[in-house]
Amino acid sequence: MFIDRATITIKAGDGGNGITSFLHFKGKVGGGPDGGDGGKGGDIIFVADKKLSSLADYYYKTKYVAESGAPGEPKNCFGKQGKDLVLRVPLGTVIRDKATGNVIADMFTDGQKKVVLTGGDGGKGNARFTNSRRHAPHFSQTGEKTETKRVTLELKTIADVGLVGFPNVGKSTLLSVLTAARPKIANYHFTTLSPNLGVCDYYDNQFVIADVPGLIEGASDGAGLGTEFLKHIERTRMLVHVVDVSGTEGRDPYEDYLKINDELKKYGEGVSKLKQIIAANKTDVPGAEENLKEFKKKIGRKHKVIAVSAATRKGIDELKKAVYEKLSSLPTLKPMEFEEFNYVKPERLSYEILKEGETFVVVGSLVDVLKRNVVMDDMNSFAYMQKVLRDRGVIDDLRKMGANEKSTVIIGGEEFEFVD
């Protein structure tokens, strides 16, 4: 099943907790602290893979969580780092932040990697909190928790050449004779409902051709899934515009040509300005030669017109040559230009002070960390919290905001008297 758009939820691994531990000797207790740090959580990494052609995997499974880091261990041993989670996507996949629409990455080349979310840092073990006055800390730090994010994946096929035209003009058959691709082919409209890619060999050279599903009038406004199809030619260098000159369906190839180009123009300048070669198909059908002459007369010198028959392979070599020569004069494909958006970890030790009369409430990530790590009924742990508050400027800021000995300070839901 071809899927070119999916929204998924991703989360990097949490950091492992540091532990509180003390050395134990045979026949002796009360050794020094030896609690190790927790391991770092795994990252979320996207990788472009040329072997993939659809986002179907992300349509059926929508939640991806990297492995968390393991807790620290005694004897100052670090916890095991969580495994990174690698998500493989087809070339041409654009990754956006769901909430803002900002582009995170354009996965343009095979093997390209993008770390979208970084795993949480491991917490520190109690051995990290010793100093000249604190010889046996009975507390440790929890690992950093990571946030869940939602991203949108959108696939825009990357190819050198896009085949465009009305349904049933023979694009899929033409692709099959130009390349080794084997698209579904039948004599009815909308046989192709997703882009088919094929590689065309021309002597020692190769170029990629995308058969875009048949367009109809109003495609630029979404008719017949038009906008879904048109986006797959945004990443092509040129177009082969296929028209049916057989007249078997009562269509006027020149009117078809005008209508398709009108839809391309409405969709956007980038698409409408692509160079075109016209493949006048089904010339093996009786009466097609007369229609071809009339068509060429109306086209004039706007575009090169090559008479082909996908059924008999007439004109195929000439078409290959013309496409190769045109591509040789065009610039190579480049990734889309965008201002890269990256998820940034929130500042771990930020805070804000809210004043309510003589009550001061300290909130923020600093408080969250202290709340997780401080044991209030342990004097060493409580003294550590006071030191952090002083070192981080919280006490000075409280004083500047008018806190005095009559004030109440609330930190992490606990009430304290302010002592200056």
Image: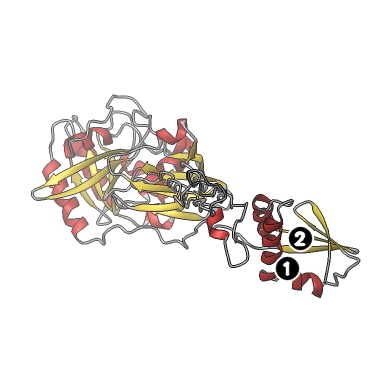
Left/right placement of residue 398 relative to residue 243 reads right
- The percent coordinates of residue 414 (x first, y second) are 79, 52
What label sits on residue 362 in the rendered view? 2
Among the 4 quarters of the image, the one containing residue 232: top left
The residue depicted at 19 percent of the width and 30 percent of the height is: 285
The residue depicted at 88 percent of the width and 65 percent of the height is: 407
The residue depicted at 54 percent of the width and 54 percent of the height is: 33
- State the SS at label 2: strand
Mark 2 vs mark 1, CA separation in Å: 8 Å
Left/right placement of residue 161 relative to residue 233 reads left
Say if residue 124 shows up in the picture.
Answer: no
Above or below, 60 against 110 in this view is above
Among the 4 quarters of the image, the one containing residue 369: bottom right
Above or below, 5 against 161 in this view is above
How many labels, in total? 2
Residues tagged 2 and 1 counted as in contact (Cβ below 8 A): yes
Say if residue 76 shows up in the picture.
Answer: yes
Badge 2: few (under 14), some or many (20 or more) residues near its Cα, within 10 Å? some
- The percent coordinates of residue 35 (x first, y second) are 52, 50
The residue depicted at 35 percent of the width and 47 percent of the height is: 47
- The percent coordinates of residue 268 (x first, y second) are 44, 54
Labels 2 and 1: the sequence-earlier one: 2
Which quadrant would the C terminus be assigned to in this image?
Answer: bottom right
Residue type, numbered disc 1: Val
Residue type, numbered disc 2: Val
The extreme front residue here reads 27
Q: How is the image coloured?
A: secondary structure
Badge 1: few (under 14), some or many (20 or more) residues near its Cα, within 10 Å? some
- State the SS at label 1: helix
As rendered, which of 46 and 13 lies closer to the eye?
13
The extreme left residue here reads 203
In the rendered image, which residue does mark 1 sit on? Answer: 394
